[in-house]
Image (cartoon, grey):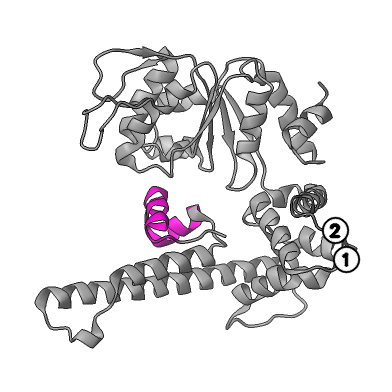
Amino acid sequence: MTREEFKAKFGIISRSKEVNDIVDIAMQVAKSDISVLLYGESGVGKEVFAKAIHGYSNRADKPLISVNCGAIPEGILESELFGHKKGSFTGAVESRKGYFELADGGTLFLDEIAETPLTTQVKLLRAIENKEFMRIGSETVTKVDVRIIAATNKDLQKEVAAKKFREDLYFRLKAVTLHIPPLRERKIDIEPLTLHFINNYCQNNNIPVPKLSNEALEILINYNWPGNIRELKNTVESVLALNTDKILTDKHFQHLIIKNDEQETARNLPIFTRKLPEDVDREIIYRALFELKKDILEIKEILLKREDYEFNEKNKIVPDDDVLDIEELERNAIIKALEKTHWNKRKAAKLLNISERTLYRKIKDYDIRIW
């Protein structure tokens, strides 16, 4: 199979040399059982490469089980991975296989591996190295044959240095590391990806395929795409859903990209003209710092209101009409942080000073829709 045939079969849309180099390595390592670590920002397509490696491997006819380690609450992650016996803990009304058993003979894709608790990392390392584990509440060892592909948007070396990730597990996972660059570093891929998303959406919805004007393409290429390929896909589909024009022009994308971008970076800020390159860089830094400070102050204000409420509620001095809905305040703070970070959950969690795992849980608890 050639590189282009591999890309076509597994849905890898790219013209860039960087991605082509990654494809070449993926094709080489796919036939072995060596562990692969995929590194890259959210939305760059790490899961696409995991599926491609599995699909091109000798295990292709066996299951590929994908696990988002950051989306599973810490208290049940071990049970999800290794399973449990009936009655082993409260709520264990029946025995259950874990993802390792379900992936036996195939591939286990551990997404957001950096979010795995240290206590679970110990058992994870043993399961990978010895190909065996024990269900929670079981006294017998279960043996499995599973290939591991892990993914992260964090620098695991820094996580190891910060004692947040086990060094032995890190070295076990990084046998082959593939760094998938963000979309802003491979702008040559924006055009084929956009055309692919347009054709797919129109085909799935049985509507005519519009043309993409050069002006619209220029806007897409010049945008920074903090959400990477996922954001590009959502943007294209939003435009197609809201318009029936035969040609997509720059006007179709300005309100989604340019206008919002300018509003976020230029509010209450001085305007400079005839900027030198170093002036532009300095202004960008000033704007970023200004917005960050503003966001922090807004969140602090929300938290202070919450603390005042809790104190007054405890001392029973708040009139009925002044009572604040704490859950609503917290939900609004999360939504605001997500909007400020273009729905990047990692950045939003950092802005709120909470873990990504906690953010995932609260998004689910408050039924916040992620666009």
**Point 41% across, 55% down: residue:** 364
Instruction: Give residue 251's position: percent from left, percent from top.
Output: 80, 73
Task: Please check the rendered image and state whether residue 232 is part of the magenta-colored stretch, yes or no.
Answer: no
Give, as a single range, the part of the protein colored magenta. Answer: 346-367
Quadrant of the image containing the C terminus = bottom right
Report which residue position mark 1 lands on.
Answer: 246
Q: Residues within 10 Å of mark 1 (few under 14, many from 20)?
A: few
**Point 75% across, 55% down: residue:** 205
Instruction: Give residue 360's position: percent from left, percent from top.
Output: 42, 52
Instruction: Give residue 127's position: percent from left, percent from top.
Output: 40, 19
Which labelled disc corresponds to residue 308?
Answer: none
Compare marks 1 and 2 and give the one earlier in the sequence. Answer: 2
Q: Main secondary structure of the magenta part?
A: helix
Task: Check disc 2 and report its element: helix, strand or loop.
Answer: loop
Closer to the camera in the image, 167 or 343: 343
Left or right: residue 216 compared with residue 291:
right
Closer to the camera in the image, 94 or 313: 94
Task: Please check the rendered image and state whether residue 347 is part of the magenta-colored stretch, yes or no.
Answer: yes
Left or right: residue 324 compared with residue 110:
left
Where residue 83 sits, quadrant-wise, is: top left
Instruction: Give residue 124's position: percent from left, percent from top.
Output: 39, 25
Task: Check disc 1 and report its element: helix, strand or loop.
Answer: loop
Report which residue position mark 2 lands on.
Answer: 208
